[in-house]
């Protein structure tokens, strides 16, 4: 396997990791920002207030985006296994 193929496979894998993690990260970021603004305006500095809504938001994102995440991961894996004979020389 040449270096170019290895680099291309690594790039595709990293792109898929970014795409698959983006919905949960973005939703957690938005909820965290909203909680931080709420804490700053009300001057409530409770530590658990920041974590619980973010955990729930990420859980909800998994439920909503779960089928899409699974389909994307399966498509990538199928493409990788179908082209396996091209990688081995």
Image (cartoon, helix red, strand yellow):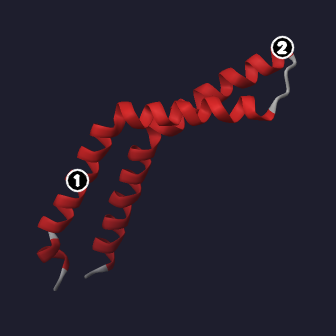
**Residue 15 place in picture, x, y as percent:** 38, 52
Q: Which residue is mark 2?
A: 42
- What element does badge 1 sit on? helix
Q: Residue at x 68, y 36 (%)?
A: 51
Label of residue 37 in the image? none
Q: Residue at x 41, y 38 (%)?
A: 62
The quadrant in which residue 66 appears is: top left
**Residue 30 place in picture, x, y as percent:** 59, 26
Q: Is residue 15 left or right of residue 87?
A: right
Q: Residue furthest top?
A: 41
Whichever of callouts 1 and 2 sits on the residue coming sooner in the sequence is 2
Task: State the residue in front, 68 or 79.
Answer: 68
Q: Which residue is mark 1?
A: 74
Q: Is residue 6 left or right of residue 52?
A: left
- What element does badge 2 sit on? helix
As displayed, is residue 12 above or below residue 33? below
Q: Is residue 52 left or right of residue 39?
A: left
**Residue 38 place in picture, x, y as percent:** 75, 17
Task: State the residue in front, 6 or 37.
Answer: 37
């Amino acid at each position: 396997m040449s270096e170019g193929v290895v680099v291309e496979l690594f790039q595709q894998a990293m792109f898929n990791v970014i795409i698959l993690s983006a919905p949960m990260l973005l939703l957690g970021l938005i909820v965290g920002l909203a909680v931080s603004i709420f804490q700053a305006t009300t001057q409530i500095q409770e530590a658990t207030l920041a974590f619980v809504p973010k955990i729930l938001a990420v859980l909800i994102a998994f439920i909503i985006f779960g089928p899409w995440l699974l389909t994307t991961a399966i498509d990538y894996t199928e493409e990788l296994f179908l082209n396996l004979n091209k990688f081995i020389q």
